[in-house]
Image (tube, rainbow, N blue to C red):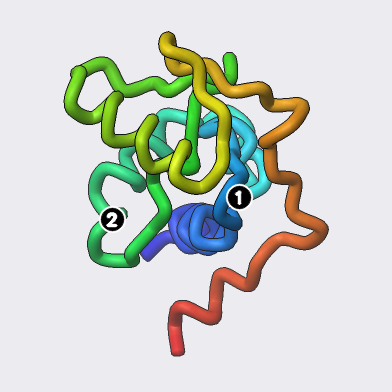
Amino acid sequence: MEEFTKRAIAIIASIPAGKVMTYGQIASLAGSPRAARQVVRILHAMSKKHRLPWHRVINGKGRIGLQDEVSFTLQKMNLEAEGVAVSAEGAIDLSVYQYAPARIPDAHAMDE
């Protein structure tokens, strides 16, 4: 597994309940600020395998990025269950709910 992928997975796994991070924020912290789309692919391909809290990752505009109604509703319900206020359109106030980790999680803990 590539280092960027390991770091992104570790960062996503560290997002606490009731908080969100953006795809771009995760990409930057993982070492590649322009790789937001890669974070989307990682979530799509590895969320189940690594039990990632995929629902805590949103787009840079502070919105749920999923387009299909079922996925949008599932993400909205999961966030609301954790206490995140989500508008009917899927907007989340990043000034309230955005997570900024004090330190970047150790990506190599996954190797053990």
Q: Nearer the viewer, mark 1 or mark 2?
A: 2
Please, which residue is most extreme toward the top here? 89
Q: Residue at x 59, y 47 (%)?
A: 18
Q: Circle 1 sits in a helix, a strand or a loop, which is it?
A: loop
Location of the N terminus (image quadrant):
bottom left
Percent across and percent down for residue 46 are 28, 55
- Residue 89, numbered circle: none
Total number of numbered discs in the rendering: 2
Circle 1 packing at 10 Å, graded few (<14), some (14-19), many (20+), is many
Label 1 is placed on what type of residue?
Ala
Residue 106 position in % (x across, y down):
63, 72
Q: Which residue is mark 1?
A: 30
Q: Position of residue 41 (x, y in %)?
A: 31, 39
Q: Residues within 10 Å of mark 2 (few under 14, many from 20)?
A: some
Residue closest to the eye, 82 or 43: 82
Q: Is residue 97 above or below residue 51?
A: above
Reading the image, the residue beneath label 2 is 46
